[in-house]
Image (spheres, helix red, strand yellow):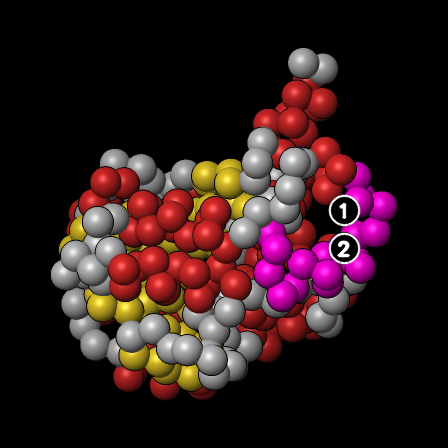
Amino acid sequence: MLQGKTVVVTGAASGIGAATAALAAEHGARVISVDVNTPQRSVGRFVRADLSDKASIDRLVAELPPGLDGLANIAGLPPTRAAASVLTVNLVGLKYLTTQLVPKLSDGASIVNLASLAGLEWAQSLDAIRASESLDFDGVEAFCSRFGIEGARSYFFSKEALIAWTMQHRWTWRARGIRMNAVSPGPVDTPILPDFIQTLGARAEEDMRTMDRPGTPDDIAPVVAFLLSNGSRWIRGTNVPVDGGMHSNILCQIHGL
């Protein structure tokens, strides 16, 4: 499915990122694994980078070769971390890395952003989302203060804005055949699942009761791999829920179905 392609996977040291890197390699890709932490077992070439640090991202971009066929933006922080840190890594750093790497992407390349079911209500945050379009590393603290983004809200907003950004760039690089899509998991059994349960409390417990089980990284990685492959070449600006039916369940509740 990915034979002969070179793909960059961020957050590759654990969880969904590690599963995606391993699956991409299994399907024939040359994988460049990126993380701030050293993986126990690296897939392909490992490059350390900190997405909260602009200079670190610049060094990463300079080190990566041209001719990249895919970028899977999977690195992220959980809602238990400081709000400014969450926004910096999950949104500002992700967007900066992506735009800086576009010149190194091959024609026909694919960008896949890991969003979340937490971003479902993005349409309710349009003012803040529009304001975040010009957000840079130095302005995150002021932005959080301006829009009252604190606690778990930082994670929710980062995913709302990421989904909107993905849709906005449905055709940005169409002349080169470069497409961007997102994947939105529900609760997934990764090292940061306890952070979500701790932060969201009763809401998370209700979601877990509704679902048959939490997802696993192996439930999510195949969807990311498909979106990186040529089989998804006419899917653009789409957010794919991979959540055991939770997205549909919420929509049915909202609309009384």
Q: Mark 2 points at which residue?
A: 197
**Classed neighbour count for the residue bearing mark 1: other residues with Cα under 10 Å, few (<14), some (14–19), many (≥20):** some
Where residue 63 sits in the image (x, y, percent)?
A: 28, 84
Q: Does any portion of residue 153 appear in the rendered image?
A: yes
Q: Where is residue 31 in the image (x, y as percent from the top left)?
A: 28, 69
Give the mark, 1 or 2, whose residue is nearer the N terminus. 2
Seen at 68% across and 18% down, the residue is 255
Q: Mark 1 sits on what residue? A: 204
Indicate yes or no whether the magenta region holds residue 164: no
Q: Does the magenta stretch include residue 196?
A: yes
On the image, which quarter does residue 152 sit in? bottom right
Tell me where residue 247 sits by quadrant: top right
Depth order, front residue of 130/108? 108
- For image coordinates 76% across by 46% down, the residue present is 204
Q: Which of 226 and 101 is in front in this view?
A: 226
Q: Which residue ends up furthest to the top in the rendered image?
A: 257
Give SS at disc 2. Answer: helix
Vertical order, 218 against 145 (above or below): above
Question: Total of numbered circles in the picture?
Answer: 2
Part of the protein shown in magenta: 188-206
Residue 206 vs 14, above or below: the answer is above
Identify the amino acid type marked 2: Ile
Which image quarter: residue 90? bottom right
State if disc 2 and disc 1 touch (CB < 8 Å): yes
Q: How far apart are marks 1 and 2 (CA)?
A: 5 Å
Q: Position of residue 215 (x, y in %)?
A: 57, 47
For the C terminus, the quadrant is: top right
